[in-house]
Image (cartoon, rainbow, N blue to C red):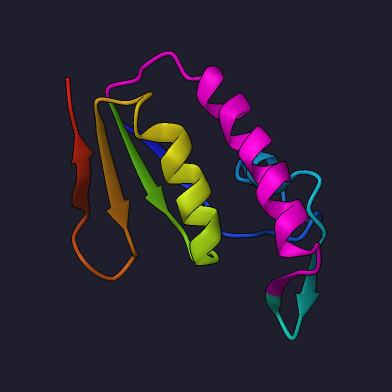
């Protein structure tokens, strides 16, 4: 199963989800990531990024979206994965993983 974390990261963090936020300004504010790019611009940027991430995934059976992120980021990511994968799950990190879409 593919897991895509949508948690924003500051550029100094070296973890895979930085590609999702590439081109979006994320700064550290009191130890927490803060997105300073205007939401309209960020939606367009992460929309392009998630499509590129999905295009690079060959196993399109299952994907889990996870990580603390703005709701709009989940909506953009879900839109990109819902028809690319057979099953889409959500995990909030506190509760069991939930199946949110299945087809095929």
Report if residue 1 lies within the magenta region. Answer: no
Up the image or down, 100 lies above or below 71; here it is: above
The one nearer the camera, 18 or 77, is 77
The picture places residue 65, in percent across and down from the top left corner, at: 39, 48
> What residue do we see at 53% from left, 64% from top?
69
The picture places residue 22, in percent across and down from the top left corner, at: 76, 44
Report if residue 43 lies within the magenta region. Answer: yes
The residue segment tinted magenta is 33-61
The picture places residue 80, in percent across and down from the top left corner, at: 47, 34
> What residue do we see at 27% from left, 45% from top?
89
Q: Residue pushed farthest front?
A: 40
Query: In the shown orientation, is residue 44 left or right of residue 17?
Result: right
The picture places residue 51, in percent across and down from the top left corner, at: 58, 29
Query: In the shown orientation, is residue 23 left or right of residue 104?
Result: right
The one nearer the camera, 94 or 100, is 100
| Quadrant where the image shows the C terminus | top left
The one nearer the camera, 30 or 22, is 22
Up the image or down, 45 lies above or below 91; here it is: above
Query: In the shown orientation, is residue 4 left or right of residue 30?
Result: left
Up the image or down, 79 lies above or below 29; here it is: above
| Quadrant where the image shows the N terminus | top left
> What residue do we see at 46% from left, 52% from top?
75
The one nearer the camera, 3 or 85, is 85
Q: Residue pushed farthest bottom?
A: 30
> What residue do we see at 48% from left, 19% from top?
57
For the image shown, how many numbered marks are present on the structure? 0
């Amino acid at each position: 199963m593919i897991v895509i974390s949508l948690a924003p990261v500051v550029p100094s963090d070296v973890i895979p989800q930085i590609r999702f936020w590439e081109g979006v300004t994320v700064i550290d504010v009191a130890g927490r990531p803060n997105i300073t790019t205007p939401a309209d611009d960020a939606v367009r940027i992460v929309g392009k990024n998630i499509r590129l991430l999905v295009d690079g995934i060959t196993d399109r059976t299952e994907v889990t979206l996870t990580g603390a992120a703005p709701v709009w980021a989940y909506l953009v990511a879900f839109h990109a994965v819902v028809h690319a994968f057979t099953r889409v799950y959500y995990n909030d990190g506190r509760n069991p993983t939930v199946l949110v879409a299945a087809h095929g």
